[in-house]
Image (tube, rainbow, N blue to C red):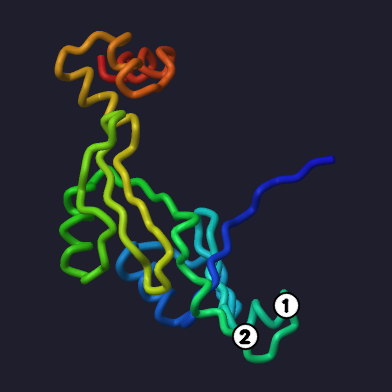
Amino acid sequence: MNIHFKTALLFVKDVAVSRRFYEEVLGQKVEYDFGEDVVFCGGFAIHDASHISKLLFNRENPNISNKQGRENCELYFESDELDDVYSMLEQSGVTFIHRLLEQPWGQCVVRFYDPDNHIIEIGEPMSAVIKRYLLTGLPESAVAQKTSMPLQEITRIKSEMD
């Protein structure tokens, strides 16, 4: 038996508002637009909460607004231009969970809410973190220990830098 993950599906109050947010603020591209269901390239989709609630629970007028964005999952994105992304997020007026910060493993990230209070995280790629540490002269073994990345990956990235 083969089971393959296809997409994460977020229930949203207003598909148009959420679609604009993901397209205009986060620069995501729509792969399919089915009206109440919009699938983005990269593996996530948004679905009108009222519509999906009727399909899942057979409720005509569901009270779904208190169930969204309960801080129990997040969508994770990466960008090589995290400082620019952060500035754009500040200008867009998103509600930050926390501002740009460095995680214990060295990765810089920012977390905020989408229009339905789903958690969004944007971080720099771990390859950028590894390169930053290697450029400071840290030995490969120390970079592997600091980032929790396999030594083989550190070595591979270092060979690409040479």
Q: Nearer the viewer, residue 24 or 121?
A: 121
Q: What's the residue at 30%, 67% (across, down)?
A: 25
Q: Are marks 2 and 1 in contact (CB under 8 Å)?
A: yes
Q: Nearer the viewer, residue 96 or 161?
A: 96
Label 2 sits on residue = 62
- Residue sticking out furthest to the bottom: 61
CA separation, marks 2 and 1? 9 Å
Q: Is residue 113 left or right of residue 138?
A: right
Q: Earlier in the sequence, mark 2 or mark 1?
A: 1
Label of residue 114 in the image: none
Q: Nearer the viewer, residue 154 or 161?
A: 154
Q: What's the residue at 31%, 54% (across, down)?
A: 111
**What's under tag 2, amino acid-wise?**
Pro
Task: Determine the secondary structure under disc 1.
Answer: helix
**Quadrant housing the N terminus:** top right
- Residue 30, image x and y in percent? 48, 67
Q: What's the residue at 20%, 55% (across, down)?
A: 86
Label 1 sits on residue = 57
**What's under tag 1, amino acid-wise?**
Phe
**Quadrant housing the C terminus:** top left
- Residue sticking out furthest to the right: 1
In the displayed structure, would residue 78 be above or below residue 10? above
Q: Nearer the viewer, residue 96 or 156?
A: 96
Q: What's the residue at 23%, 47% (across, down)?
A: 82
Which image quadrant is residue 95 in? Answer: bottom left
- Residue 141, image x and y in percent? 32, 9
- Residue 106, image x and y in percent? 26, 30
Q: Is residue 84 left or right of residue 2?
A: left
Binning the other alpha carbons within 10 Å of mark 1 as few (below 14), some (14 to 19) or many (20 upward) gives few
Q: Is residue 132 left or right of residue 42?
A: left
